[in-house]
Every structure is written in structure tokens, then in C-alpha cells.
Image (spheres, rainbow, N blue to C red):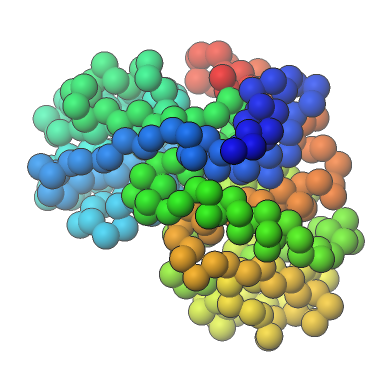
Amino acid sequence: MNNKNSETLGTFDINNIPNLDVAVLGALELFQREKLPTIKLDTFKRPLVVGSGNAEATGRIIFEDWDAVFASESNYEQKLKDIHSIDSVIIISASGGKHAPLIAKRAKELGKDIALITNNPHAEAMQFVASDRVFVFPKNREPYTYNTSTYMGMILGKTHEDALNIQNFIEEHIKTLSMPDFSKYDRYFLIVPTRFSGIIRMLQVKFIELFGRKIARDVETSEYMKHAVTVVPSNELFISFGDRNMVWGASENRLNIPLPEYAGYATMMAIGYYVIAQIQKSKPPFFRENIVAYTKDVSKIFGSTISPIVE
């Protein structure tokens, strides 16, 4: 197996931060080598699943077939207060730090069973969680906020998709596509199949992290596109995944990205991130130019050191 992307992730420094596609392929390489833990929580009947940003979206994907309540760091206390049937709390956090210890501490104070799904074997939140309720997933060294191997591993732990099959599909069917000149556009509309509605927030967040407000973007399902999301036209590129877009945008402003028949959420995430990386390559290095200053500022906010490179 070729591990060139994993090797890049293991050696890069702040001056040569890799683009997102390296993180995608490196994650798929990792999951061909590493075994993923099984999340077994049979005693949890109606959990509150809590996460921040893409961790919240990951929780919604993993537990979409549970009788679960979902929350973020902003509203978990209100959910615990108002929904009395909640018997447990599942915290999704790559680092197991920042908001995670506060959420775990509050859940313990309320006498709730707690589980932690993380990538950090030394997570601060672990002090509030029984050892058999902590599930530590493998991860790669990545730029801060990329969180590709982290959440992809958790999703694969649920869907059991084959990482090698996903990598081969990207190499053979996505990498070989004739891509448009992404530098011509500063507005993008991503259209995903309805069965992947849970990926919308993850794709939106990745645009925000990489481009801020310098790039406009929307992400909706193919079914939601029938509603009033294109009333005001603009010169944007419509990128559809799986289902071919024959309606939205001028024909020259459409890009159709195939999905394999076996695609689950991990495949959709990998291919979606890989395509976003092609946009990233066509733009100035906004992320690389700003991530050091950002992590310095956010370290002050959280009162702990946050590095631009997550080891």
C-alpha cells in the first residue's frame, strides 16, 4: 500500500501546509492500516448527542437511526433541562478538550450516563467518563480544523465502508475528471443526494474554515433545490454529487461528480472534501496565511494552547 499522503502529513510544517485532498487520501491510507473501535452503548436508551461544529454533524450521522436528541455546546444545557426522557449523554470531540470537559462535568452533576467518542487518548473530558465508555479512534497529524481523519474514522466505525475502495474510486474516477477552471468562480452551490442530508453541515463548515467569507457557498440536497434557493441568479458553479444536475445553472456552470453505488457517508465525505480541495488549490492560500494568527487568538479564548498543527 502506498502511504505517501500519510508520510506528507507526518512531516509537513507550518510553511508547507498540505491542501485538504492530502488529508483525505492520508485518512483513507490510515484506515487501511488501523482497526476502528466498535461503539457499544446498549444501556443508552435516549441519549443527548453533543458536539461542536463538525463533531455535531458527525454525531447526527452516527446516531441518525437512534432515538436520540442532538445538541451543540450552545444549547445542550437547555435540552438537558427541558427533555426529561434523556437518560445519557454522548460527547463527540476530536480533542476531548475545549467544551467537552464542561459538558461532561455538567452531565455527571445531573447523574447522566456519559460516553466520549474522541481521537485523544489523554482527553481532558475522560476524567468524567467511565473507561469502558470512552472510544478512542485513530487519527493522522493534520492542520488544525482539517479534522478529516478524526471524523471520517468515527463515521467509518458506523458505516463499515471499505477505505481502499473509497481511495481507488477517487484515484480512478474523481482524480481523472476534467475539472473546470475553479479560479473563474467565487460562488459555489453543492448539491448532494437526499440520503446524505447529514453531510450538508460538514461541507458548509469546511468552506468556512478554508475560505471564510471570501468565497460564497451553499449546500443543499437535490430535493431541497426545488425550493426558493435560486430566486436570485449569480455566476456560480453548481457541483452535483451522484445525481446528475440537468436543471440548475447554465450548462457551462455545472459540474457532475460521480459516486459509487456502495457510497455511504464516509465516501460522500471523502469525495466532497476532495472536490473542495480542488477549489482550495485554485485560490490564494487563505488558510495557510491565517491559521497561525487564528490559533494564537483562539488559545486565549479557551485558556489553553491550540497549535496550528494537531499532532
Tell me which corner region of the image, top left, top right, bottom left or bottom right, holds residue 307. Answer: top right
Position of 125 relative to 183 (above/below): above
Looking at this rendering, what residue extends furthest in the bottom direction? 247
Position of 182 relative to 102 (above/below): below
Q: For the C terminus, which image quadrant?
A: top right
In the image, 273: left or right of 235?
Answer: left
In the image, 223: left or right of 142?
Answer: left
Q: For the N terminus, which image quadrant?
A: top right
Name the spot of residue 185 as percent of width and height, x first. 84, 61
Q: Residue at x 87, y 61 (%)?
A: 181
Q: Residue at x 58, y 72 (%)?
A: 242
Looking at this rendering, what residue extends furthest in the front direction? 1
Name the spot of residue 237 as percent of width and height, x first. 77, 68
Position of 199 relative to 290 (above/below): below
Name the spot of residue 133 as percent of width and height, x first. 21, 30
Name the spot of residue 232 as percent of width and height, x first. 73, 77
- Of residues 265 and 304, the one nearer the viewer is 265
Q: Residue at x 37, y 54 (%)?
A: 159
Asked whether the viewer can see residue 128, the reply is yes
In the image, 290: left or right of 243?
Answer: right
- Of residues 209 and 118, the one nearer the viewer is 118
- Of residues 38 and 236, the one nearer the viewer is 38
Q: Residue at x 46, y 51 (%)?
A: 162
In the image, 55: left or right of 311?
Answer: left
